[in-house]
Image: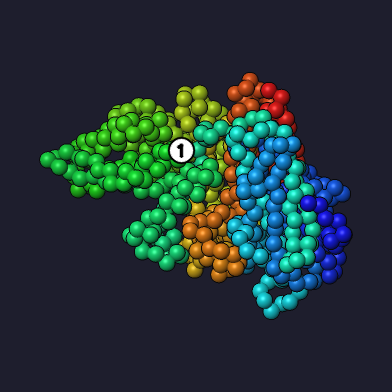
Amino acid sequence: MTIFAATLLALLPSQEGAVRIWATGCTEKVQDDRRAELPHEGVWDETARVVRVRGVRGEHVPFQLVVTADHVEVEGVTVDVADLTRGEALLPAERIEVFLEYMVKVYAPTGTHGRVGYWPDALVPLSRPFDVRSARRDRGPVLKHQPLWVDIDVPRDQAPGLYRGEIVVSAGDEVLGSVGIELTIVDVELPARRTFAAQMGFFYGREIARVHGLDPESPEFRKLWFEYLGFLLDHRCDPTFIDLGVTGRVENGEYVVEWTDPALERFLVERGLARFALGAVPPGVSRAGAGEEQFRAWAEQYLAQVIAHARENGWYERLVFLAPVDEPQSAEEYAEARYWGALVRGVDPDVPLAVTEQPVPEDPSWGSLVGACSDWIVHGSFLDENREAIAQRQAAGETVTWYVSCDQVYPQANYYIDREAADPRMIGWITWRYRLGGILYWATTLWREVRDPFADAISWKHSHCNAPAAGEGMLLYPGNLIEKYTAQANVHGPIASLRLALLREGLEELELLRVLAESGRGELADELAASLCRDVHDFARDPVEIDAARDRLLSALAAQ
């Protein structure tokens, strides 16, 4: 329904004592210093009071709904979403999820570009009425704007065309305002199987158990663990650095691999994990204790058995071994990486050894890893100076991805809370710009330095690498603390950060660029990426500019 008389205040510009309902695109962080009178014009039509978005079948299409209360207390706010319709075609309201954007306090800025204040980050499923407290100062932070993340999950079998609907915001029996939705569905389907791996470190199991108050060895925690894994996969991310249950023992002088968690393995295979990354070193044996010849024999046996198991269970093409040296920085570490590269290639030359290093060493005296490693994970700061070498490795059939780390400061992209919303979304576009095969990020639940992430957003406190940092290594929040901090209902498992949701937007667009290129228009895909990303240090942060490039991408896909 459309309401006029009851929404008079919502139609007026923000003023003292007024309540206003409005919308903006997904690539903004709405804070109290945000000028509500100038919303994101690329998506929001203030005159018509309609938010206009476009998407493809199988894609998430988000925008933000904002309740602005200027010097008034608004209690018991509810949000009602109607079905989206196109004639008799229906996109049900059940496919439209609304999240309360919880404002976390950043009390220490991240680097010189960071800024203290309250930042929207935790996306809390909206299950109960909420309050907007911009008047009384005795009940927590005074925040004029309460943004809500509205996520439209477009079914894969949805008929294309223009769908219309409405969101109505009320407080008790009083309607505060309504916003129209116009969703154009392009007759293209986002591929279900991902081409670009998005490896997200996931190894702080004991921290997850601690924050949830569970024994890490309990059945309850195992169920929770699977919820976290599935949640990341639902966001087009690959949980990595996880224990796949691979162990081993020496029996009659031979190394025997044991697989102790077949349920986890089946889960990851069925859910489409893009890369199975296992350590190259056989667990449970020592190189120093066994002697070089014996250890090498055991290592070869371990590698051969893992490879055979991967073949039998359907993930051989996704298998990669990890070099035991991370970011090698000496001749000795380079020699160690070459040692393991030779071992892996000797057992199966088609299985890659991954190393977090660029093809050209910083010090030529270290030698080269070319010929030993065939899966390169390049630090973002080295992308430009390694462009020619990267192209050579790709031409040789090798894989090159990239990673973002704590030392990649502004103007480079990063996942910090007190950074522009464009940063995580643009990571996908940067990946295409440099013709890379995917991304890596080291952690998603770095809670070891905080009581809990809702209470303390400064997850990175004690390091020489750009500490303090808000949200470093922390892209998820625990669902068991939702009620404590927001009065919304708890959920079993994690909830996303705004940054993770924006990363998913960029990853979806990355796959759509590939669809466009594979239709014979690779030059246009490259042109679109170049229009937003000059290089890894210089890319668009203007949401209108980003959405304009996305619209060109969708229009090109619609025309094929």
In this picture the colour scheme is rainbow
Find residue 320 and report its horizontal and vertical position in percent.
39, 36
Residue at x 75%, y 49% (from the top left corner): 166
Q: Which residue lies furthest to the front in this view?
A: 88
Query: Circle 1 sits in a helix, a strand or a loop, which is it?
Result: loop
Q: Residue furthest bottom?
A: 138
> Mark 1 = which residue?
272
In front here: 194 or 87?
Answer: 87
Residue at x 48%, y 57% (from the top left corner): 493
Residue at x 79%, y 62% (from the top left corner): 176
Badge 1 amino acid: Gly
Find residue 309 and report its horizontal and vertical position in percent.
30, 34
In front here: 152 or 122?
Answer: 152
- In this rendering, does residue 124 appear at all? yes
For residue 219, above or below residue 382? below
Find residue 181 and report its horizontal and vertical position in percent.
75, 46
- In this rendering, does residue 536 appear at all? no
Looking at the image, residue 218 sits to the left or right of residue 288; the answer is right
